[in-house]
Image (cartoon, rainbow, N blue to C red):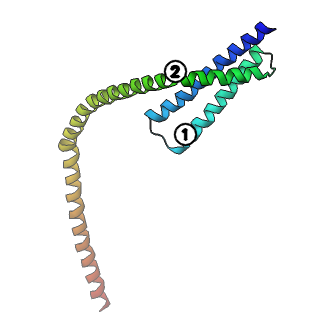
């Protein structure tokens, strides 16, 4: 019985470490990506759902669904152990890696987009601007002719009334 309790304590200590990792995962997301409050709320809800699933999974698979005080003590011990030892190292390392990857991806996107911008500007100058200028001139000319036409029609109406 004591071996079984020690085993369960170890399992729940590991589960506490897992919950600490999960918590840090969401902390890392918040540090590296700016999100709106709604996303933060969704992340919080997702954290608690995953934490609950983890605890229930361990309870049913390792202790046949029974609750014991030492299981919760194991969770708390694992969480505290993780937070005091590995948390800062993992957060700092992962945030640094993500920041470097974001910088590399940004540079790759810039390298890909720069030629596309040049091509767009060339196409814009050669094709779209002449069409736009033609459209504006045509519209202006049409508007002037329309005003002259309306003026003539209004004059004709006035002459007919007299």
For residue 70, above or below residue 158: above
The disc, 1 or 2, on the residue closer to the chain's N-terminal end is 1
Quadrant of residue 12 within the rendered picture: top right
Provide the secondary structure element on which disc 2 rests: loop
The image position of residue 149, as x and y in percent, is: 25, 73
Q: Quadrant of residue 80?
A: top right
**Distance from Cα at disc 1 to Cα at disc 2:** 24 Å
Residue 7 higher or lower than 68, as above or below = above
For disc 2, the neighbor class at 10 Å (few under 14, some 14 to 19, many from 20) is: few
Read off the residue under disc 2: 86
Residue 66 position by quadrant: top right
Q: Residue at x 22, y 63 (%)?
A: 140
Tag 1 secondary structure: helix
* Residue at the disc numbered 1: 40
Q: Position of residue 79 (x, y in %)?
A: 62, 24
The spot of residue 19 in percent (x, y) is 61, 24
Marks counted in the figure total: 2
Residue 18 visible in the picture: no
């Amino acid at each position: 019985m004591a071996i079984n309790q020690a085993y369960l304590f170890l399992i729940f200590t590991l589960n506490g470490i897992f919950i600490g990792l999960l918590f840090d995962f969401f902390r890392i997301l918040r540090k590296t990506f700016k999100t709106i409050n709604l996303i933060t709320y969704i992340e919080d809800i997702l954290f608690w759902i995953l934490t609950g699933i983890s605890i229930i999974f361990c309870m049913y698979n390792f202790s046949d669904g029974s609750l014991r005080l030492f299981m919760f003590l194991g969770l708390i011990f694992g969480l505290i152990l993780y937070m005091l030892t590995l948390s800062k190292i993992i957060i700092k390392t992962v945030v640094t890696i993500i920041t470097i990857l974001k910088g590399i991806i940004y540079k790759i996107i810039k390298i890909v987009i720069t030629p596309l911008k040049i091509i767009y500007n060339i196409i814009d100058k050669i094709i779209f601007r002449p069409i736009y200028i033609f459209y504006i001139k045509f519209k202006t000319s049409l508007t002037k002719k329309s005003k002259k036409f309306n003026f003539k029609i209004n004059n004709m109406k006035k002459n007919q009334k007299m």
